[in-house]
């Protein structure tokens, strides 16, 4: 790594010789024979390293070093002297010098020292940038991110949280939909009351009905005691219906009635019980398409979809990937008692280039695995899962200028539509909106491409 070098030596011939040699090696030198002029220039322009003789007229090299350290501590200082004794070296180090070179200067050794100093400054800048990013790392409950999509999400949560409106959270699996629901609850006036989550896809219809609405004793086999159900357990708080797109069609009318009437009838009971609960639902399915295809009730869809919040995909969040990775590294390193402090540059590039089909959940699992396997203080590429190491971006268009490798406009359209479908997690409503196509047109094209309706 080359950089800008500010040289200060009262011997003009020495300055000219260093200037010529360092330019040949790729550095950009600027030189002065008077320390005061060099320091004035340093206040106006940026340099990567200061190379100064100790014996200077007026302001000495030691004094110059002390002033640079006091005013521009980010710039490493290398001192030169013909008096290479321990006392002189100690004075330079005490003044804050980064390194010490004796005269006559061996140019190869000087080049190594300058490269090391430039690399040191670049590393310090990286650490400073990452520290500032960590300080500015926005958190909303357990949601974290600095990217524009996440800032937009935080803004939506802040505006909607303290209302009683039903919210539908949409997003791919692993994006953090439950974290959004918990943030909405925490920021609401109901925050002191229970937050009750239930995964609607995890239970068969009979058990799901009993979980939601409760049951009387003896309502069915093994119902030896009564249960009041989650609508009543969440009284005064929030009921989070995760994966609501998987709720059975037979149960949807009863759920709709409960939401409309704010009353539930336990299984096996003839009595309706009122409840006061805010409903937040989430799904990774395209509910508008499910409504059109008769797999989800339209009236229930509009009842839960008063406000819609879209959770961004990890691959759309830019450098949030690295900030989240750092958070997970600190967490898993602390749990395992290992001294892991960050990522190598190559590992960071791999994380940024990967498409993250499993979103934040996949990133968390990848970092947990890497921390467990690594032998170093920084995670290396070989610590990452194989599919991340081997991943290569797929180009929609060929970059070749060979006419035999070029493709038709129809093939360009096919690749782009499938690319958009992959980017939105196969959500046809979102894809149609991006492509500016109506859904029926998109469906016909997908059928022509052989994409399964399901």
Image (cartoon, rainbow, N blue to C red):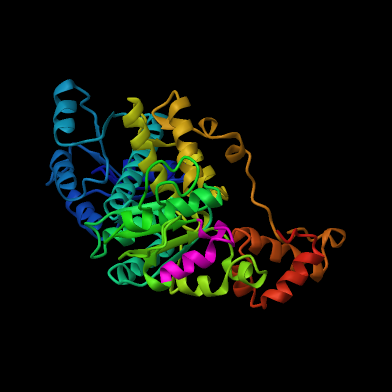
Asked if residue 239 is positioned above or below residue 409 in the image, the reply reads: above
Span colored in magenta: 243-259
* Residue under the image location 80 percent in, 60 percent down: 450
Q: Position of residue 248 (x, y in %)?
A: 58, 58
The quadrant of the rendering that contains the C terminus is bottom right
To which quarter of the image does residue 140 belong?
Answer: bottom left
From the viewer's perspective, tell me whether residue 334 is left or right of residue 280: left
* Residue under the image location 40 percent in, 35 percent down: 111
Q: Position of residue 266 (x, y in %)?
A: 41, 57
* Numbered-mark total: 0
Can residue 127 be spotted in the picture? yes
* Residue under the image location 56 percent in, 34 percent down: 385
Q: Where is residue 85 in the image (x, y as percent from the top left)?
A: 19, 22
Asked if residue 376 is positioned above or below residue 330 in the image, the reply reads: above
Asked if residue 321 is positioned above or below residue 51 in the image, the reply reads: below
Q: Where is residue 72 in the image (x, y as percent from the top left)?
A: 21, 49
Asked if residue 37 is positioned above or below residue 299 in the image, the reply reads: above
From the viewer's perspective, tell me whether residue 221 is left or right of residue 420: left
Can residue 145 be spotted in the picture? no
Say which of 62 and 304 sits in front. 304
The quadrant of the rendering that contains the N terminus is top left
Does residue 29 belong to the magenta stretch?
Answer: no
From the viewer's perspective, tell me whether residue 208 is left or right of residue 75: right
């Amino acid at each position: 790594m080359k950089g800008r070098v500010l040289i200060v030596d009262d011997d003009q011939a020495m300055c000219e010789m260093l200037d010529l040699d360092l330019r040949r090696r790729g550095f950009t030198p600027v030189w002065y024979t008077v320390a005061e002029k060099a320091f004035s220039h340093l206040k106006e322009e940026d340099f990567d390293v200061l190379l100064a003789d100790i014996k200077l007229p007026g302001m000495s090299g030691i004094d110059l070093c002390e002033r640079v350290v006091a005013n521009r501590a980010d710039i490493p200082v290398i001192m030169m002297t013909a008096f290479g004794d321990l006392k002189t070296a100690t004075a330079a180090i005490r003044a804050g010098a980064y390194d010490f070179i004796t005269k006559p200067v061996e140019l190869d050794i000087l080049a190594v020292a300058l490269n090391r100093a430039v690399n040191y400054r670049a590393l310090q800048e990286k650490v400073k940038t990452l520290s500032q990013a960590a300080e500015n790392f926005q958190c909303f409950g357990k949601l974290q991110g600095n990217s524009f999509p996440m800032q937009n999400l935080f803004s939506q949560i802040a505006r909607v949280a303290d209302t009683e409106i039903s919210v539908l959270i949409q997003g791919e699996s692993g994006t953090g939909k439950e974290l959004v629901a918990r943030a909405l609850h925490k920021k609401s006036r109901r925050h002191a009351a229970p937050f009750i989550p239930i995964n609607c896809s995890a239970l068969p219809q009979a058990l799901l009905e009993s979980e939601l609405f409760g049951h009387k004793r003896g309502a069915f086999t093994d119902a030896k005691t009564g249960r009041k159900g989650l609508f009543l357990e969440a009284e005064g708080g929030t009921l989070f219906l995760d994966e609501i797109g998987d709720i059975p069609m037979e149960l949807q009318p009863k759920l709709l009635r409960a939401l409309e009437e704010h009353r539930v009838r336990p299984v096996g009971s003839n009595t309706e019980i009122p409840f006061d609960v805010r409903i937040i639902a989430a799904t990774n399915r395209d509910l508008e398409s499910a409504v059109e295809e008769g797999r989800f009730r339209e009236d229930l869809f509009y009842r839960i979809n008063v406000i819609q919040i879209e959770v961004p995909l990890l691959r759309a969040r830019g450098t949030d990937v690295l900030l989240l990775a750092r958070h997970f590294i600190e967490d898993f390193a602390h749990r395992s008692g290992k001294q892991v402090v960050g990522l190598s540059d190559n590992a960071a590039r791999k994380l940024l280039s990967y498409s993250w089909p499993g979103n934040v959940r996949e990133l968390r699992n990848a970092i947990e695995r890497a921390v467990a396997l690594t032998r170093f203080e920084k995670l290396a590429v070989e610590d990452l899962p194989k599919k991340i190491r081997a991943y290569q971006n797929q180009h929609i268009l060929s970059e070749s200028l060979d006419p035999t490798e070029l493709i038709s406009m129809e093939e360009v359209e096919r690749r782009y539509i499938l690319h958009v479908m992959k980017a939105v997690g196969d959500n046809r409503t979102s894809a149609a909106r991006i492509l500016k196509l109506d859904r029926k047109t998109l469906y016909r094209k997908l059928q022509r491409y052989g994409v399964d309706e399901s």
